[in-house]
Image (cartoon, rainbow, N blue to C red):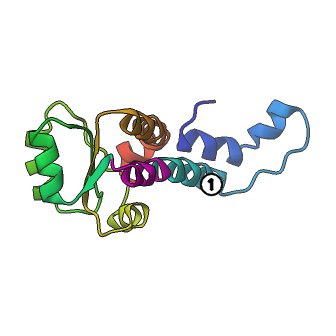
Amino acid sequence: MTARRDMVDAAVHRRLFARAFKAPVETPADLGAQVDAGFAKAALSALGLARRCGDAVVGFEKVRAALKAKKASVLIAASDGAEDGREKLAVLARHIAPYALFSRAELTAALGQDAVHAAIMTGPSAARFEKFAARLAAYRSADMATGE
């Protein structure tokens, strides 16, 4: 089994956990969603920690300035944010793959202020966020490919 949501959902549906453990196992029908929420919570917590440490900037202009100065190593954009803003920042961040895993509301809750764009400065905070965000992106990979 792979840590992808479609695989977890299929395993729950086909009762594969009981087979694997060779014992009766009750798995919640929404196990895939619970795992997704756990991965998302870990990534958003790392983002919030980066902000509290002073390693994150929020807002288009601050993110643009950090990218121009080549201080940022992580670019985050709200999945429901305007495409033109993401494109303008992507031009400055050719060396950085942007993360668009969270909605504006999720970013705002994690960062404590209205957030469509954020960046994390190069360092341990960026590495921590990227570790959790990469897990979430891999877990959601099939859903993202199909647009679900």
SS state under label 1: helix
Q: Which residue is pictured at 68% across the width and 41% down the height? A: 11
Q: Which residue is pictured at 57% across the width and 35% down the height? A: 3
Q: Is residue 128 inside the magenta stretch?
A: no
Q: Position of residue 126 (x, y in %)?
A: 36, 37
Vertically, is 109 above or below 24?
below
Asked whether residue 15 is in view, the answer is: yes
- The quadrant of the rendering that contains the C terminus is bottom left
Q: Which residue is pictured at 54% across the width and 38% down the height? A: 4
Q: Which residue is pictured at 43% across the width and 36% down the height? A: 134
- The quadrant of the rendering that contains the N terminus is top right
Vertically, is 72 above or below 106?
above
Residue farthest toward the right in the current orientation of the protein: 23
Q: Is residue 25 left or right of residue 2?
A: right
What range is drawn magenta here?
A: 44-54
Total numbered circles: 1
Residue farthest toward the front in the current orientation of the protein: 53
Vertically, is 80 above or below 74?
below
Q: Position of residue 91 (x, y in %)?
A: 8, 41
Q: Is residue 117 left or right of residue 13?
A: left
Vertically, is 94 above or below 81?
above
User: In the rendered structure, which amino acid carries the disc numbered 1?
Assistant: Gln
Circle 1: is it few (<14), some (14-19), or many (20+) Cα within 10 Å? few
Q: Nearer the viewer, residue 8 or 43?
A: 43
- Image quarter of residue 106: bottom left
Q: Is residue 90 left or right of residue 141?
A: left
- Image quarter of residue 145: top left
Question: What secondary structure is the magenta-colored segment mainly?
Answer: helix
Q: Position of residue 142 (x, y in %)?
A: 44, 41
Q: Position of residue 89 (x, y in %)?
A: 12, 48
Residue that label 1 marks: 34
